[in-house]
Amino acid sequence: MVQCAKQFLHIMSGYFPNVSKIEFEGPDSDNPLAFRHYNPDELVAGKSMKNHLRFGAAYWHCMRNPLGDPFGVGTALMPWDDGSESLDNALVRVPVFFEFLEKSRIDYYCFHDRDVSPEGATWAETHANLERVTQELKGAQEGSGKKLLWGTACLFAHPRYAQGAATAPSADVFAYAASQVKHALEATHALGGAGYVFWGGREGYASLINTDMKRELDHLAQFLHMAVDHARKIGFTGQFYIEPKPREPSTHQYDSDAAACLNFLREYDLLDHLKLNIETNHAELAGHTMEHELDVASAAGALGSIDANRGDQLIGWDTDQFPTNIYLCANIMLRVLKMNGGQGFTTGGLNFDAKRRRESHLPEDLFHAHVGGMDAFARGLKIAARIVEDGRFDEFVKARYASFDSGVGAEIESGATDLNALNSYALGIEPPVLDSGRQEMLENLLNDYL
Ligand code: XLS
Ligand code: NI
Ligand code: NI
């Protein structure tokens, strides 16, 4: 009877009874649970905001993150969750998450296999659990129109992966990881996922003193080739991504930054099959700006998707905070607008790989967090669209390199000259005079758009 009444209440008011569907109310609204800038169907540069931004929510942070930190246990209140690692509890979380997606107007989601379904008593039961929850997710997708941006396998939490998964010193661990990816990939395929991510949380080392780096890298490449081959076998045509991150908890991850990933993919003949999923907080941990990582990926034609979050100036961890910095969002969206020859995201999107602070433990804080991130990116999009349309930055940069458009510069670019010819040329001209790089002028101009 009590159970019935509880279910009835959920049907009436949902799992988030304090929150109704978030509406666009415009910049003057003082409703903290309304969008001031994100208006899903509004056209910006000829395309709806929702299609530019392709927001995704992370199942792990929304549904599974208890908000603990190294000094204290979790604080998150999740009244729907009985705290058990059971299949039943996993199934209960699905409608909760989809209610969250519905009310927050987030169109996509991402998950690790172990976020959505628990390990079983046997390895076969573990796979069966994932299959069962996949059916449930499929039903929820069909009922809501929500889509899977990407799936992935959690190859870092279980103790068996303590020394790596694809780069473990044990062939049996490698086999377990391969088996897990096979099923995660098949689940992603069954759910019509637009992509599949590899983030090598344990693919690296704690110390070189016991590590055969060359062998581990070879194994990682074999692993990725097997995944690509399996995708072909089952007809999965989504985009594969590799997600760079430098360290933590390892001292070094092989996928440490965009440049390292690209070098690895090229060396092992994988660049045709994988693009990069760039995460802001990881860029910062690698000692780069997000803009740098996006430009490195773009220059190789390998920018695929984005994990949207930010770090903290004062804390050196992957704090996975929600993005709120409009300046940064504008700079990110400038690059997104130019992706794929100006098409923007094709398979990728902006996945909020972000969690609330430990102090924000109430279910409705999930909404405050995402609404803020979505509004920050909506503003970033509008600013970036104005910058592109206005064209002054592009013109400045183009003019800065104009000496390569003709004459000796064009010969350099096309490979039509050599050191002897350039020596004669240099001897015949006046010493070079540079124009100003005008960094400050451009920084001022950028501020004018904000
Ligand atoms: C962790 C990563 C992880 C990936 C998916 O730092 O960001 O969440 O996005 O495995
Ligand atoms: Ni991530
Ligand atoms: Ni991260």
Image (spheres, rainbow, N blue to C red):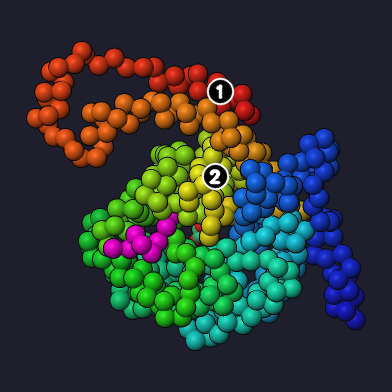
In the rendered view, would you say 240 is above or below 412?
A: below
Residue under label 1: 445
Instruction: Say which quarter of the image contains residue 425.
Output: top left
User: Is ligand 2 closer than 8 angstroms to the Cβ of mark 1?
Assistant: no
Q: CA distance from mark 1 to mark 2?
A: 19 Å
Residue under label 2: 337
- Residue 246, horizontal then vertical, whole percent: 39, 49
Q: Secondary structure at mark 2?
A: helix
Q: Nearer the viewer, residue 113 or 400?
A: 400
Residue at position x 64%, y 66% in the image: 147
User: Is ligand 2 closer than 8 angstroms to the Cβ of mark 2?
Assistant: no
- Relative to residue 383, is residue 347 drawn left or right? left
Instruction: Say which quarter of the image contains residue 12.
Output: bottom right
Based on the picture, tell me whether residue 276 belongs to the magenta stretch: yes
Residue at position x 65%, y 38% in the image: 382
Locate the N terminus and report the quarter of the image it occupies. Answer: bottom right
- Residue 446, horizontal then vertical, whole percent: 56, 26
Which portion, as a residue range, is magenta?
A: 269-281
- Relative to residue 207, is residue 13 drawn left or right? right
- Three-letter amino acid code at disc 1? Leu
- Three-letter amino acid code at disc 2? Leu
Q: Secondary structure at mark 1?
A: helix
Residue at position x 56%, y 69% in the image: 193
Q: Residue furthest front?
A: 407
Classed neighbour count for the residue bearing mark 1: other residues with Cα under 10 Å, few (<14), some (14–19), many (≥20): some
- Residue 344, horizontal then vertical, whole percent: 54, 50
Residue at position x 62%, y 28% in the image: 449
Based on the picture, tell me whether residue 381 belongs to the magenta stretch: no
Q: Nearer the viewer, residue 421 or 248?
A: 421
Of callouts 1 and 2, which one flags the residue occurring earlier in the amino acid sequence? Answer: 2
Q: Dots 1 and 2: beta carbons under 8 Å? A: no
